Image (spheres, rainbow, N blue to C red):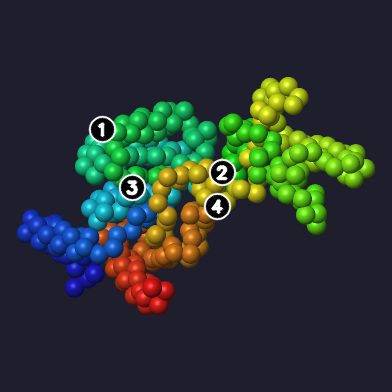
């Protein structure tokens, strides 16, 4: 009996009503069981293998991408049913613009068609309260596609429970460059409100530091300098002027925001030393999303390919699966979730003794 004949028998059996009912009941039971354990807050999918799937099944490349979008709908429902709040998918890389023009145009039109279907039949996203966000260089999207992108975002903007991030067109290096650029712009053009060039505590510290080992108190200093200190006055005055000039030259302030000389309302800009990873987080495309818990890439390729580089941190679990993306379903995602939950429970067990010792 040939493999083709067996495959047809299997597909016929699985598509029969009794088999479909049994499979759906099993799916619901498995998803319900998974929901009882820890659930990742943010999962990212690098949807790789559409073209190779198409070649292996002797179909057009665009049809492979079409089946990939269908796989995305299946995965979204699984994730949202389990309780995942944010799903981020890599739909189109900036590097994909180097592909043949007919393929790039086909991908753009496919995205347009699928987003239009999402607008017309958005019951999946509305059912789970998921809003669509499109992340990337929107200025590179053709106008007709961009118009549909904006409508899809607006059509789901009322949903606040879950998020679907579609990276299109996107690379992590471009995202980080944009985040750093906007951070620099904010720190160099936005003065801190109600700032003064010197705080009272700094003035006090400055005066005390100039006394060296002298026994005078702050009260005696405020009464005025003694005659013995007169010969130091000019030197101190020059030093204070140098400090003031040094401070002023580091502010890069807009003259329009400054007051007259001697005023305390001089514009003070944030210190660049206060920039932290959290500062950059606030300027990323994914700002406001929880940390990335799971990163999944299909097709057997074991590299990140410039996707979610910043968001992948010390607690992100990365899974490289051998199946092509159009084949991806619950039976491929189930082991990923089970493995992640096992690791979370193991981590909790390891942290528990340390908490007991500290107590």
Please tell me whether mark 4 sits on a helix, a strand or a loop: helix
According to the image, label 1 marks what residue? 120
Please tell me whether mark 2 sits on a helix, a strand or a loop: helix
Quadrant assignment, res 298: bottom left
Quadrant assignment, res 45: bottom left
Q: Which of disc 3 and disc 1 is earlier in sequence?
A: 3
- Left/right of residue 77 with respect to residue 109 in the rendered view: left
* Mark 1 or 3, closer to the camera: 1
According to the image, label 4 marks what residue? 277
Against 39, residue 124 (above or below) is above
- Mark 1–mark 3 Cα distance, whole angstroms, equals 16 Å
Q: Which of disc 3 and disc 2 is earlier in sequence?
A: 3
According to the image, label 3 marks what residue? 69
- Near mark 3 (Cα within 10 A), the count class, few <14, some 14-19 or many ≥20, is many
- Near mark 4 (Cα within 10 A), the count class, few <14, some 14-19 or many ≥20, is few
- Mark 4–mark 3 Cα distance, whole angstroms, equals 34 Å
For the point 80% across and 57% down, which residue is it? 213
- Left/right of residue 286 with respect to residue 187 in the rendered view: left
* Mark 4 or 2, closer to the camera: 4
């Amino acid at each position: 009996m040939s493999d083709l004949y067996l495959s047809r028998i299997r597909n016929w059996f699985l598509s029969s009503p009794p088999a479909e009912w049994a499979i759906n009941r099993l799916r619901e039971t498995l998803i319900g069981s998974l929901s009882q354990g820890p659930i990742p807050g943010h999962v990212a999918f690098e949807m790789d293998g559409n073209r190779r799937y198409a070649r292996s099944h002797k179909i057009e490349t665009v049809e492979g991408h079409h089946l990939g979008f269908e796989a995305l709908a299946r995965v979204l429902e699984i994730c949202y049913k389990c309780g995942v709040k944010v799903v981020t998918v890599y739909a189109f890389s900036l590097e994909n613009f180097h592909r043949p023009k007919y393929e790039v145009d086909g991908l753009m039109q496919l995205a347009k068609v699928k987003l239009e279907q999402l607008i017309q039949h958005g019951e999946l996203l509305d059912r789970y309260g998921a809003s669509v966000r499109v992340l990337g260089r929107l200025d590179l999207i053709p106008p007709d596609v961009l118009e549909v992108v904006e409508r899809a975002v607006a059509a789901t903007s009322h949903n606040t429970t879950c998020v679907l991030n579609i990276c299109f067109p996107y690379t992590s290096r471009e995202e980080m460059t944009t985040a750093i650029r906007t951070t620099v712009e904010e720190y160099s053009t936005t003065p801190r409100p109600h700032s003064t060039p010197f705080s009272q505590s700094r003035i006090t510290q400055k005066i005390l530091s100039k006394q060296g080992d002298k026994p005078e108190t702050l009260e005696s200093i405020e009464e005025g300098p003694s005659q013995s200190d007169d010969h130091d006055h000019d030197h101190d005055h020059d030093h204070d002027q140098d400090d003031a000039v040094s401070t002023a030259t580091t502010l890069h302030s807009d003259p329009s925001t400054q007051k007259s000389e001697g005023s305390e309302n001089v514009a003070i800009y944030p210190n660049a030393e206060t920039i932290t990873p959290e500062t950059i987080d606030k300027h990323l495309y994914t700002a406001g999303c929880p940390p990335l818990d799971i990163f999944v890439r299909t097709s057997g390729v074991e590299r990140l390919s410039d996707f979610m580089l910043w968001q992948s941190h010390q607690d992100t679990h990365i899974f490289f699966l051998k199946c092509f993306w159009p084949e991806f379903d619950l039976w491929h995602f189930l082991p990923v979730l089970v493995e992640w939950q096992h690791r979370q429970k193991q981590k909790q067990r390891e942290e528990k003794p340390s908490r007991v010792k500290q107590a």
